[in-house]
Image: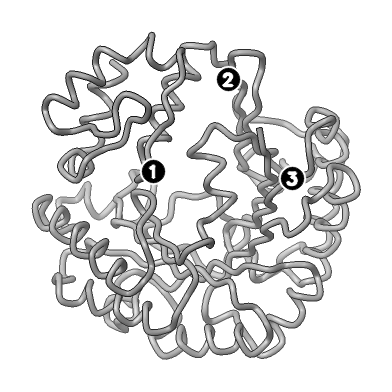
Amino acid sequence: MPFGVYVHYPYCARHCPYCDFTVAVTREIPHKAYRDAVLAELAARAGSFAGRPPAISLYFGGGTPGLWPAENIAAIIEAVDGRLGLAPGAEITVECNPEDVTAATAPALRAAGVNRISLGVQSFDDALLGRLGRKHTGDGARRAVARLRAGGLEDINIDLMHGERRQPLAAVLADVHAAVELAPTHVSTYQLTIEEKTAFGARARRGERLLVEDDVLTAMYGAVRAALSDGGIEPYEVSNAARPGHEARHNSLYWTDGEYLALGAGAHGYMHRGDGAERWENLRHAGRYMQAALAGRPGETFRDLLDAAERLEDRVLCGLRLDRGIAVDPALEARFGDRARRLAEQGLLGGLPRRWRATARGRAILDRVIVDLVS
C-alpha cells in the first residue's frame, strides 16, 4: 500500500470564524523552533514506517504553512526523503493564503522542492470574503495565481466554499466560473459547516442562521459539480474535482485506506496493523507539542486501535466518497454484500457486483447510504 506524510503547521495570522482546525494565532511565530520539533518527531517516528516503499506525497497543511519560510520547508522535505524516501515525482503540497503569496513565494518554494500549491481562495466575492473573515480580495486571489505561475508552480488547487446564508446560487456559480477561468489543475469545493467550537458556532448557539436551507445546499452541490465538469475540471470525490491526471494523491490516501505519518501539532496519522489499523492525533497545543517532540517523546491526545471489522467500515465510509467507489473484495462482500444489493435495488448504489459506487441519486444522500450500508 502507498503511504504519505502529513505535516501540520498550526500558526495563522488570524483565526477564521468557521475554522475548527488546530491553529495558534500569534505575531511571533517560532519558525525554526517548530521546524526543529517536527524534525525531532520525524526522527522518533520514522522507524514505525520503515520498510515501506518511498512516500508518494508530502503535504504541508495548517494553519497557514505558506507563512513558514521556505528554508524550513526545505529542511523537512530533505529529512523525510533521507529517512523514509520520496518517490520520483512525489506530490509535495503547501497550503497558502492568497494574501501571503508574493513574487518571491513560488521561486523559493520550488527551490525547496514543492511542486503543488493549495490556495485558500474560498470565494471571489469581496463581501462574502469579509463575512468569512478572510483578508484577501477576489482580485488578490487572481494575482496570487498569476504570481505562482510566473514563479514556475503550475499545479494549483483552488479551495472554494459555499452555503453561507446570504450567498445565492448565482454567486456560487460565479465563484466556480471565476476559478475555472484561472485554469487550475484541481478545485476543492466545500459546504460551509458550523463547528461548535468556533466563532460561527457561538453565533449559531445564539440563534443566528448562518447557512442556506438544506434543499438549497443540495441544489448548489449539483450545480457546482456540473459547472466544474463543463469547465473541464471533472469531479471525482464528494468535494474535489481535477483535470485528468491531477487528482490529489495525498488526499486519495485518506479515501483508499492508504497509510500516512503525522508530524506536527494536532496532526492525524494512520497505519495498518495486520488486518486492523491504528490511528492517532498528536498533541494539539503547539507549545506542549514542541516541548514533547524536542524531548524525543512526541505525545498524543489519543491513539486508537481498529480491529478488522472497524477497518472495513472505514474503507466503506471513505471509499464511497469517490465517484468511482470501492472495488469489492471477499471481505467487503461477506460483510456488506446483502445490504449493498438492497441499496442497488433502491437505485442508490451502482457498479455491482465488482464495484460499489453511489448513483447520482445516492450521492445526494450519501451519508444515509453509508449508514445503511455499514449499520
* Image location (x, y in percent) of residue 188: 41, 61
Question: Badge 3 is on which residue?
Answer: 55
* Image location (x, y in percent) of residue 132: 34, 69
Between 225 and 15, the one nearer to me in the picture: 225
Residue 209, numbered circle: none
Sequence order check, earlier mark of 2 and 3: 3
Q: In the rendered structure, which amino acid carries the disc numbered 2? A: Asp
Q: Residue furthest front?
A: 353
Question: Badge 2 is on which residue?
Answer: 304
Question: Residue at 49% across / 70% down in the picture?
Answer: 185
* Image location (x, y in percent) of residue 345: 13, 24
Residue 322, numbered circle: 1
* Image location (x, y in percent) of residue 258: 60, 35
Question: Are dots 1 and 2 in contact, CB under 8 Å?
Answer: no
Helix, strand or loop under label 3: strand
Residue 103 lies, with reference to residue 168, above or below; the image says below
Which quadrant of the rendered structure holds the N terminus? top right
The local crowd at label 3, few if under 14, some if 14 to 19, many if 20 or more residues have their Cα within 10 Å, is many
Question: Residue at 54% across / 31% down in the picture?
Answer: 257
Left or right for 289, reference 186: right
Q: In the rendered structure, which amino acid carries the disc numbered 1? A: Leu
Question: Residue at 24% across / 34% down in the picture?
Answer: 350
Left or right for 361, reference 350: left
